[in-house]
């Protein structure tokens, strides 16, 4: 298994440096790599038989599920076929050639005709919210619609909406033919889910043993947590209010100008006001497009001299009046621009409720004070915890309840921010570093609130993890700006996939901080107790990571026809899963994992895999999942 882990790590680096074909040739499709998976499966099964695992139904089923998944992957590799097909409206394609992983060609026993192709856009935006192809299979004449997350099945072949031509009159479909591999793999997924749930109710497991050992053993703050400081002169506030009341086309959508100001700053925005898309224009069909004063306007505008003067000169007049200190006149001009926007673009403007929600959201979205409070409390409680554990004493009751009260306030703040963003955007906190970091902080605070009485160490660990994640969310480069989702991300499976992954990452972070505490404390019995605590957290963490990873595979298969593409983030998620699985079962095979000091050091080092999976892939390795 260690060799497989190293090979997968190396493959992602080679893919970045040499390209995807080289990575597949040297690693993923290399016979040695495939054979190693077979060796792991066979010897793992033999070990299970020798240790009496068949007597434990869910433990046995868990490992059988992984064997089924590997068998399905092998069948897909040996017999699966895939390809891409390009269609133009009104044209039929001849029988298309597919290739399998060995490069053997096969011909489609039918052809396709593209009747029409349509694109839907987010309201007031030119960003696609979805696209679909109306297809007829020939010669039978069967008519189907194919769109993102809505596949078509025909004669054992599956067709996926992959892309389209820039002129909107051509469609690109992905084709997959894998009659046996997907079924075997899905059977493995179902068995895996059932066995993971059943494992927690099974007697005589490592989880139940560790759990048993663990079981035996204000207003000023609210204001500081919930509201940022506001400093500005009355004149500046008046001008900023007038500017913030307008609308702007920004980030592929129409939004309150307050959002733009939060991103760009008042002074920078004022200096470049002529370059901001403030002016909506409707064409003869009623379609609204947005322009900046510096843009080239449609020819029809030049026929209306009064309108043209307004579009060209209003922003310059604002800057001139501000420069002369006449902010009240500048505010009047801005109010006039808003009135024009409401007259021309009323159908595409956000509702009043969403405007108010977004203005509140944009003012509290960056948790700068909150992350400093979290980190300070985390460090103080961590040091106090180390001292108390070394002396074999408990946290004072008042300390625990004060920490829990602060965690509750922070959780309410995070719930407010996430809820406002969800309401305004219409989608949950599933995509983007800001969303994910705030979600991890939300889980951290919730963990403190729910577990502080039975697991006091959750307070320093939770505050440290929550502080670091909010710190990352508050960075200038991590924007809380609300963006429309691309079509492939609009699947309902996305929310469950991301929540599972983020919950597992949060728990792994808690285990890493617990490992640091375990390393710092010299007493062996305390180290062993902390090791048991880590094990109790690791079992649900690994199972959540497993569930999230394979649910993501199902989502990928539904969306673009391949449940596993060895994308760098997929590969590193699998690496993380294998590394952490060693902490659960390593003690039975490798005696070194039974040593508390080594165990804690390993869990600290293992968290590097989580950091690389999320940050390293995004920043360094790229791939299909680099948006997340």
Image (spheres, grey):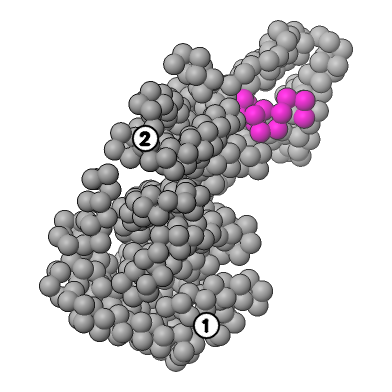
* Residue found at the very far left of the displayed protein: 55
Judge left or right: residue 227 versus residue 153.
right
Left/right of residue 291 with respect to residue 22 in the rendered view? right
Alpha carbon separation for disc pair 2 and 1: 51 Å
**In the foreground, 91 or 124:** 124
Name which of mark 2 and mark 1 comes first in the sequence. Answer: 1
Q: Is residue 500 at least partly visible in the picture? A: no
Observer-nearest of 379 and 18:
379
Q: Residue furthest right?
A: 324
| Residue underneath mark 2 | 394
Provide residue 499's location: percent of width, then percent of height.
38, 48
Q: Tell me if residue 133 comes above or below residue 243 in the rendering.
A: below
Q: Which element type, helix, strand or loop, lies under badge 1?
A: helix
Q: Position of residue 559 (x, y in %)?
A: 40, 62
Task: Judge by depth and name the residue closer to the eye, 487 or 346.
Answer: 487
Vertically, is 438 above or below 541? above
Q: Residues within 10 Å of mark 1 (few under 14, many from 20)?
A: many
Prevailing SS of the magenta stretch: helix
Residue 262 is covered by the magenta coloring: yes
Quadrant assignment, res 202 = bottom left
Q: Position of residue 300 (x, y in %)?
A: 70, 35
- First to last magenta residue range: 255-268
x and y percent of residue 128 in the render?
A: 51, 49
Q: Residue visible at 62% across and 18% down?
A: 229
Q: Is residue 201 left or right of residue 136?
A: left
Q: Which residue is mark 1?
A: 27
**Are discs 2 and 1 less than 8 Å apart at CB?**
no
């Amino acid at each position: 298994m260690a060799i497989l882990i190293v090979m997968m790590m190396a493959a992602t680096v080679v893919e970045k440096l040499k390209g995807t074909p080289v990575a597949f040739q040297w690693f993923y499709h290399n016979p040695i790599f495939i054979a190693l998976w077979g060796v792991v499966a066979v010897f793992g099964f033999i070990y299970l038989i020798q240790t009496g695992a068949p007597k434990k139904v869910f433990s046995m089923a868990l490992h059988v599920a992984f064997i089924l998944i590997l068998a399905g992957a092998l069948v897909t590799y040996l017999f699966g076929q895939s390809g891409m097909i390009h269609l133009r409206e009104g044209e039929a394609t001849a029988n298309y050639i597919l290739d399998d992983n060995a490069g053997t060609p096969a011909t489609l026993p039918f052809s396709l005709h593209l009747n029409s192709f349509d694109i839907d856009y987010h309201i007031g935006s030119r960003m696609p919210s979805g696209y679909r192809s109306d297809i007829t299979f020939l010669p039978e004449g069967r008519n189907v619609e194919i769109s993102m997350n809505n596949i078509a099945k025909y004669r054992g072949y599956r067709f996926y909406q992959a892309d389209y031509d820039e002129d909107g009159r051509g469609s690109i479909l992905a084709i997959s033919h894998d009659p046996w591999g997907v079924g075997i793999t899905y059977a493995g997924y179902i068995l895996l889910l059932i066995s993971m749930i059943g494992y927690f109710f099974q007697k005589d497991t490592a989880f139940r043993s560790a759990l048993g050992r663990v079981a035996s053993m204000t207003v000023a703050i609210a204001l500081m947590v919930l509201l940022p400081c506001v400093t500005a002169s009355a004149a500046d506030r008046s001008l900023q209010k007038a500017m913030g009341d307008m609308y702007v086309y920004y980030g592929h959508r129409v939004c309150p100008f307050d959002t733009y100001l939060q991103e760009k700053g008042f002074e920078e925005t004022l200096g470049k006001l002529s370059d901001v898309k403030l002016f909506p224009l409707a064409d003869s069909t009623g379609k609204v497009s947005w322009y900046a004063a510096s843009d080239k306007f449609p020819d029809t505008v030049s026929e209306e001299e009064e309108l043209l003067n307004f579009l060209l000169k209003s922003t310059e007049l604002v800057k001139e009046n501000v420069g002369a200190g006449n902010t009240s006149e500048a505010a009047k001009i801005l109010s006039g621009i808003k009135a024009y926007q409401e007259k021309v673009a009323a159908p595409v403007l956000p509702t009043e409720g969403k405007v108010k929600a977004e203005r509140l959201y944009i003012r509290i979205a960056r948790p700068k004070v909150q992350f400093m409070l979290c980190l300070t409390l985390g460090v103080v409680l961590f040091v106090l915890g180390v001292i108390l554990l070394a002396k074999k004493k408990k946290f004072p009751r008042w300390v625990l309840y004060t920490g829990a009260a602060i965690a509750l306030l922070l959780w309410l703040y995070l719930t407010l921010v996430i809820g406002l963003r969800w309401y305004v955007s219409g989608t949950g906190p599933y995509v983007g570093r800001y969303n994910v970091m705030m979600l991890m902080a939300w889980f951290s605070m919730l963990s403190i609130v729910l577990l502080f009485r039975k697991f006091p160490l959750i307070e320093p660990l939770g505050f440290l993890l929550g502080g670091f994640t909010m710190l990352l969310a508050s960075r200038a480069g991590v924007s809380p700006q609300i963006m429309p989702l691309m079509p492939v991300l609009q699947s309902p499976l996305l929310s469950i996939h991301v929540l599972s992954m983020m919950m597992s990452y949060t728990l792994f972070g808690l285990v890493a901080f617990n490992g640091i505490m375990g390393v710092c404390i010299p007493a062996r019995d305390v180290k062993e107790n902390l090791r048991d605590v880590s094990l109790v957290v690791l079992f649900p963490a690994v199972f959540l990571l497993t569930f999230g990873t394979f649910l993501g595979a199902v989502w990928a298969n539904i969306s673009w026809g391949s449940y596993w593409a060895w994308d760098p983030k997929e590969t590193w998620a699998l690496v993380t899963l294998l590394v952490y699985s060693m902490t659960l079962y390593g003690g039975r095979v490798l005696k070194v994992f039974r040593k508390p000091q080594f165990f804690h050091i390993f869990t600290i080092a293992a968290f590097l895999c989580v950091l690389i999976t999320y940050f390293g892939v995004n920043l360094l390795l790229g791939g299909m999942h680099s948006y997340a």
